[in-house]
Image (spheres, rainbow, N blue to C red):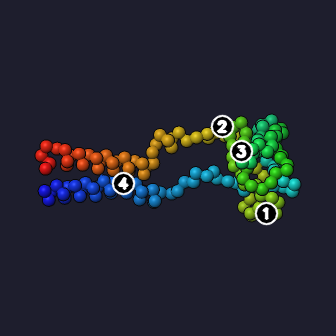
């Protein structure tokens, strides 16, 4: 009887360790932000945004449509010139999306004279052909916490079944 109690206690300790180990690994791993990385952009006087659209090789993209939105609402829609340059006026500070047919980026616009020193004065939008709409990989690959829970549950369930329902266990 003492052996059975010892085995049950050991099984519980192993299962608990199996569930806690992934949490320790997550705490040691670098934290990835779910928020997009924002680029600070200083608007010109009059709320003017200057920018250029290029491809991955740095070649200007003429006649590309550029959409600027704020909180999901379209603010402006313009086309680039022969050098891939565009200009949007009447903008205010805040987080905005800039989108082309090839992708989208998030920017934090600053009113003139209020931008941090690291802010750029223009947007350089690189059409890389990769528009990220979702993360299927994240759904198909559960993180270490979920893996630990599954493994811990399987260990606990298997040990419990082996100790309580075998013919020679009592």
In this figure, which residue is indicated by the disc labeled 2?
129
| The disc label shown at residue 137, or none | none
The span from disc 3 to disc 2 (Cα, nearest Å) is: 22 Å
Which tag, 2 or 4, sits closer to the chain's start?
4
Q: Residue at x 42, y 48 (%)?
A: 146
Foreground: 52 or 139? 139
| The disc label shown at residue 72, or none | 3
The image quarter containing residue 53 is top right
The span from disc 3 to disc 4 (Cα, nearest Å) is: 40 Å
The span from disc 2 to disc 4 (Cα, nearest Å) is: 41 Å
Please tell me whether mark 2 sits on a helix, a strand or a loop.
loop
Q: For the residues carrying marks 2 and 1, which lies nearer the camera in this image? A: 1
Q: Measuring from the top left, give residue 110's x and y in whole percent.
A: 77, 58
The span from disc 1 to disc 4 (Cα, nearest Å) is: 49 Å
Please tell me whether mark 4 sits on a helix, a strand or a loop.
helix
Kindly indicate whether the residue at mark 1 contacts the one at mark 3 (C-beta within 8 angstroms): no
83 relative to 159 in the view: left or right: right
Which tag, 3 or 2, sits closer to the chain's start?
3
Q: Residues within 10 Å of mark 3 (few under 14, many from 20)?
A: few
In this figure, which residue is indicated by the disc labeled 4?
19
Q: Measuring from the top left, give residue 60's x and y in whole percent.
A: 77, 40
Vertical side of 110 occupied by 62: above or below: above
Foreground: 146 or 40? 146
Q: Which residue is drawn at 74% across and 59% down?
A: 119
Q: Measuring from the top left, give residue 52's x and y in whole percent.
A: 78, 45
In this figure, which residue is indicated by the disc labeled 1?
114
Q: Residue at x 74, y 48 (%)?
A: 70
Which tag, 3 or 1, sits closer to the chain's start?
3
Which tag, 1 or 4, sits closer to the chain's start?
4
Q: For the residues carrying marks 3 and 1, which lies nearer the camera in this image? A: 3
Which tag, 3 or 4, sits closer to the chain's start?
4
């Amino acid at each position: 009887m003492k052996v059975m109690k010892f085995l049950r206690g050991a099984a519980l300790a192993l299962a608990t360790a199996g569930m806690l180990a992934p949490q320790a690994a997550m705490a040691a791993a670098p934290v990835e932000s779910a928020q997009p990385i924002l680029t600070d952009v200083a608007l010109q006087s009059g709320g003017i945004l200057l920018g250029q659209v290029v491809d991955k090789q740095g070649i200007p993209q003429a006649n590309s449509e550029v959409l600027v939105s704020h909180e999901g609402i379209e603010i402006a829609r313009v086309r680039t010139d022969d050098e891939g340059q565009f200009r949007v006026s009447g903008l205010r500070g805040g987080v905005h999306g800039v989108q082309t047919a090839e992708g989208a980026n998030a920017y934090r616009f600053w009113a003139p004279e209020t931008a941090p020193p690291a802010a750029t004065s223009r947007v350089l939008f690189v059409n890389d052909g990769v528009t990220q709409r979702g993360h299927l990989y994240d759904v198909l690959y559960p993180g270490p916490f979920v893996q630990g829970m599954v493994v811990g549950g399987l260990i606990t369930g298997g040990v419990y079944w082996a100790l309580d329902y075998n013919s020679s266990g009592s």
